[in-house]
Amino acid sequence: MNLSNGRPYLAIPGPSVMPDEVLRAMHRASPNIYEGALIDMVAGMVPDLKKVAGTDHNAAIYISNGHGAWEAALSNVVAPGDRVLVPATGRFGHGWADMAGGLGADVQLNDFGRNRPFDLTRIEDTLRADEEHRIKAVLASHVDTSSGVRNDIAGLRKVLDAAGHPALLMVDCIASLACDRFEMDAWGVDVMVAASQKGLMTPPGLGFVFASPRAVEARAGMERVSRYWDWTPRFNPESFYQYFGGTAPTHHLFGLRAALDMIHAEGMENVWRRHDVLARAIWAAADVWGSDGPLRLNVADPDHRARSVTSLRLGLPYGPQLREWVEENAGVTLGIGLGMSEDGDPQGRGYFRIGHMGHVNAHMVLGMLGSIDTAFKALDVPHGGGALDAAAMVMAKG
């Protein structure tokens, strides 16, 4: 019997579920890109985007995915031969490091594995050892989408200050913006990158770069910057055309406007609180399942887990069987174990990830957890009983 007919639920960690309000906003004819309502809408939208990032400074919008935002940020402040320090806690820390290397940077990688945050003491030791201040920037992921690790960005700023090091603090918030608490100015972040397809509830295709005055000063010292990635005209456009380095991503902008309206109507504190409660409900269910079975949360300490994505290890053969069963029989798509390879499982097929970001609420999470619980029973996967009760209790207490 197939019970998947009906509206499917994409529970992967991005692209996230798009609200009907966003879809309706995008369902329109192409607008004039030279004058009129679109130009006025974007001018009013940029300040609302900054509010989500927690900054009063500069914001640029690129037609790109998150990888494009990585390159845009690097291109404006890191020249070939400059050294960057990358404390990696999963696949995407390594990805940003590889991007920097491809642009000619001298990459110093500190690999902290895939199931714990970076060690601030070790990073401070590295910074203090750099007596000549060759490290120009520190590239850190707030949340790693593959491992589900959440790093202490405010603590990293304190480490830079304690070491007296002038390196720019550059942060990847692609998987955390509008999900996990992030306050760019208050935390002393110089450059932040994000993308549209996760907490911002808009289709993939928009990349965002936010920059502090220190970062703008660093850009001024660059010998050359790619015309397209250069953030200077985007921060202070003399014409609408300069916002995007060409034709505007019109329908994405209409969708983003609707998404920002939803976020600010709820309020950032409430957005963060909702993501926190729903994440803890998922973890509570996972703890119960794992009490009498092979399921394990990838990150042991809840304080180090993202509120937007949870990575879990079920092992082989259960991992792929679970994902296949819930998609075919319950209409729920879970994320693959991206970047979670290990001995005996080089493709990370024994892992799966749950995305709980953006347009997600209690009944969606409970339905997804119920589908997983049903799959455990259908597939005879050993597991503890009472997971849904545990999740419901977290939600009931808030």
Image: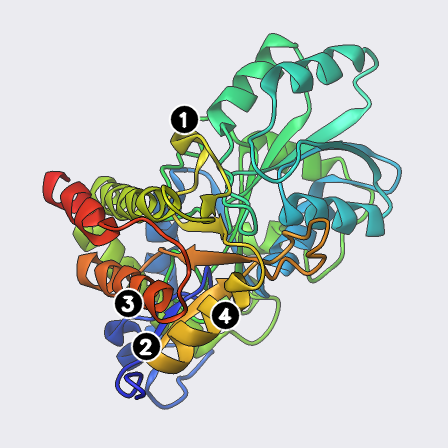
The part of the image, by quadrant, that contains residue 11 is bottom left
Residue under numbered circle 2: 330
Q: For numbered disc 3, what is the local secondary structure? A: helix
The part of the image, by quadrant, that contains residue 29 is bottom left
Identify the residue shown where x is 65% and y is 51%: 70
Q: Earlier in the sequence, mark 3 or mark 2?
A: 3
For the residues labelled 2 and 4, the Cα–Cα distance comes to: 13 Å
Residue under numbered circle 3: 258
Q: For numbered disc 4, what is the local secondary structure? A: helix
Q: Earlier in the sequence, mark 4 or mark 3?
A: 3
Of labels 2 and 4, the one closer to you: 4
Q: Amino acid at mark 2?
A: Ala
Q: Earlier in the sequence, mark 1 or mark 3?
A: 1
Q: Amino acid at mark 3?
A: Ala
**Residue 51: percent from left, percent from top:** 34, 44
For the residues labelled 4 and 3, the Cα–Cα distance comes to: 37 Å
Identify the residue shown where x is 83% and y is 52%: 102
**Residue 215: percent from left, percent from top:** 62, 35
Between 199 and 40, which is closer to the camera in this rendering?
Answer: 199
Q: For numbered disc 2, what is the local secondary structure? A: helix
Residue under numbered circle 4: 321
For the residues labelled 1 and 3, the Cα–Cα distance comes to: 27 Å
Residue under numbered circle 1: 186
Between 73 and 87, which is closer to the camera in this rendering?
Answer: 87
Q: Earlier in the sequence, mark 1 or mark 4?
A: 1
Pick the quarter of the image with the N terminus.
Answer: bottom left
28 horizontally vs 112: left or right: left
